[in-house]
Image (cartoon, helix red, strand yellow):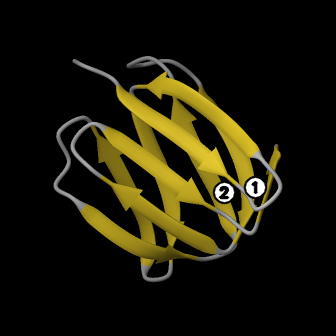
Amino acid sequence: MPKLACDITTPQAQFFSEEVYSVVVPGTEGEMGFLYGHVPLVSALTNGVVRVKKDEGGPDTEFAIEGGYVQVTGTKVIILADKAEAK
C-alpha cells in the first residue's frame, strides 16, 4: 500500500516529517486513524498521543501532543500542535 507523508509541526519548529503507513490522532470526539487515500478532513485535536506506524504491521512510534489541528488529504497528514514530544 502507498505511504502517507506525515508532518508534525509546532510553533517552534517542524518536529517530525516522514513517509508512514498510518497515523492515529486524538480528536476532540475520539481517536481518528488515517491511511493513504483518506478523504480530505480538517479537525481540532485534544491533548493526547499521536501514533505513527512507519510500515504495515510494524511498531508504533508515539508522540505526546498538546492541542492543535490535523489536516488530511489523500496523500498527506499535517498535524499542527501547540506542543509535541517523543514518548
Q: Quadrant of the C terminus?
A: top right
Pointer 1 or 2: first along the chain: 2
In 3D space, how far apart are the residues under numbered discs 1 and 2 (Cα atoms)?
5 Å
Q: Which residue is mark 1?
A: 64
Query: What crowding class fits label 1: few (fewer than 14 Cα within 10 Å), some (14-19), or many (20 or more)?
Result: some
Residue type beneath disc 2: Val
Number of callouts: 2
For the residue pair 50 and 76, the one nearer the viewer reads as 76
Left or right: residue 25 versus residue 56 is right
Where disc 1 sits, the SS reads strand
Left or right: residue 6 versus residue 72 is right
Q: Which residue is mark 2?
A: 49
Where disc 2 sits, the SS reads strand
Find residue 43 and report its image quarter.
Answer: bottom left
Where is residue 25 drawn, in percent x and y?
51, 58
- Asked if disc 1 and disc 2 are in contact, CB closer than 8 Å, the reply is yes
